[in-house]
Amino acid sequence: MGLPRSVCSECGWLKIGDPTNPLVVSSRIRLARNLEEIPFSHWATSSDLERIAESVREAMPASPHLKDGHLLCIDDLDSLDRQFLEERYLISREFLKGGIQRYVVVHPEQTVSLMINEEDHIRLQMIMAGMNLRALWKTIDEIDTELEKNLPFSFSTRLGYLTACPTNVGTGIRCSVMVHLPALVMTRRIEQVFHAVTHMGCTVRGYAGEGSDIVGNLFQLSNQWTLGITENDTLTKLEALVDNILNQERIAEAELYHENKMKIEDRVWRAYATLSQARVLSSGEAIELFSIIRLGRSLEILDSPAVQRINEMMIETRPAHLQKRAGSTLTAMERDVCRAKLIRDWFNDAIRS
Amino acid sequence: MLMNCEICKKNVARIHVTQIRDGNKLSIHICPECALEKGVAGPAINTSFSIEQIVNQASKGVTLDSHALMNPKTCTACGLTYNAFKESGRLGCAMCYDLFADELEPLLLRIQKELRYNGKYPEEGNDLLQKKREIAELKRQLKIAVEKEDFHKAAELRDRIVELGKQLLQLEHQSE
């Protein structure tokens, strides 16, 4: 069994929300939920896991947001398909490994996905382009309430929603915003930002989530607290933090450009030249160059490509995406050649249009 | 490490009685002396169970729950040890939050804002779900009462669970 066509086609969530924001790539919210009286996934028997999957499957049709979702069994997908879903942020790294009774439900628009038998029985996720936490919360709260009508979630009045890991207990909510902060990195002010973030009950991670390196000046800001704070206050706090950091980034960008106009313009145009002409591009080099192009768009040095196109290119040129497009597995060198060709074509299209 | 008898708190607990009731696992860890003295008292021990038999087995060095004997802090509902939690960072079941409450409190205070839930509550409209949740909550309390040997409270809770179970069955019949 492979991926359904609607899931394989373009990455839907990149178009929804606020896709033209040069500083914010995406916003994401996930909720962790578990079913009553069944051990958490890692400690459950295979028949427990089967019961969980069965219960969630039965509850799906009653949720207008999930009823049209594609239910995919992770073990039925090959490693390329799994990686493809992970590159779109629709499944976690943990799910790359597969595992019995592990499923993912993907909405055709790909804004909503639900993992069954991850660390928690249910991991419900919503993702959109740009800064959109309120819209995400409104919908994900609705879906959660829809599911709750048919699924008895493990809940205590003292600790809220009970989760496998105590870092999620309570609201079980994790809100993340992926931001692009090149000027704060270049001016070495990013350390101060990190310091402030951890003092506000929030955390900062690299581009690919937990434990990942910082690449392309991309950072994920997310809430840490899930107990002692309402969902609404969690959002407000993170929004205020993101706002504050983005203001600092804008100031740093303006200062940097003002003080090094020619140097910055040269760097942006060199990145543009490389992306539009290179014959071999590694994913690491591509993502660093996209970062400079994005800065060029933010400072209005460049008027193309559109920010949405940069976001698409970043996902479409990741390894599994390239191989799905080619219809075969590719060596690292073949991928770098394909990546360069794809980006070149996009840039030439952008110039022509 | 050996654990102490849950009744006299002095002798080593060599007898570990586990009973499944209403789909829940109840355990008690006691010494042979107390087992004899208490006979078959308390809701944790099934009245039809031959306690003498356990005493005999225990005296021959056979324990019913050697896992719990080796790991004094074990969740009686799912069998996860606190040490296993420390290694993996993941709890075994909802009950672990109650049974490891003392150990988890400082951890939660370190990583969370406050030790008080402040988020959304599940919808109250569904009677069936409410009853199920209430029963689950009482079962949690029952396990704690048994852990603490508050057998009087445990008996009260058990009766309440049986009563709610009957109501739940009626509701289920009505909805069919």
Image (cartoon, coloured by chain):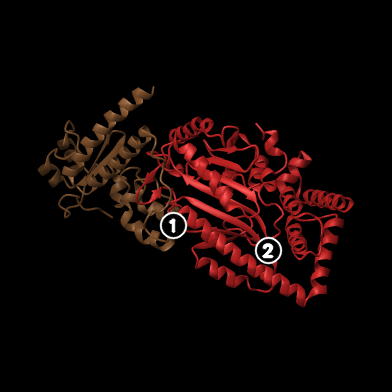
Chain colours: A red, B brown
Tell me which amino acid carries mark 1: Ile
Percent coordinates x, y for residue B137 in the rendering? 31, 42
Chain designation of label 1:
A
Q: Check chain identity for marks 1 and 2: say if they share one.
A: yes
The label on residue A94 is: none
Please give the name of the residue rendered at 40% of the width and 42% of the height, measured from the top-left corner: A154
Mark 1–mark 2 CB contact (< 8 Å): no
Q: Mark 1 packing: few (<14 Cα in 10 Å), some, or many (20+)?
A: some
In depth, the one of B83 and B158 nearer the eye is: B158
In this rendering, the answer to whether B122 lies above or below B1 is above
Please give the name of the residue rendered at 28% of the width and 43% of the height, measured from the top-left corner: B65
Most distant residue in the left direction: B37
* Disc 1 element: loop
Chain designation of label 2:
A
Q: Mark 2 packing: few (<14 Cα in 10 Å), some, or many (20+)?
A: many
Residue on which the image places disc 1: A229
Q: Is residue B64 visible?
A: no
In this rendering, the answer to whether A235 lies above or below B155 is below
The label on residue A217 is: 2
Which mark is in front, 1 or 2? 1
Q: Is residue A272 visible?
A: yes
Choose top left, top right, bottom left or bottom right for residue A72: top right
In depth, the one of A128 and A208 nearer the eye is: A128
In depth, the one of A195 and A145 nearer the eye is: A145
Which quarter of the rendering shows the C terminus of chain B?
Answer: top left
- How far apart in space, not on screen, are marks 1 and 2 (Cα)? 30 Å
Tell me which amino acid carries mark 2: Asn
Percent coordinates x, y for residue B170 in the rendering? 30, 25
Percent coordinates x, y for residue A5 in the rendering? 70, 34
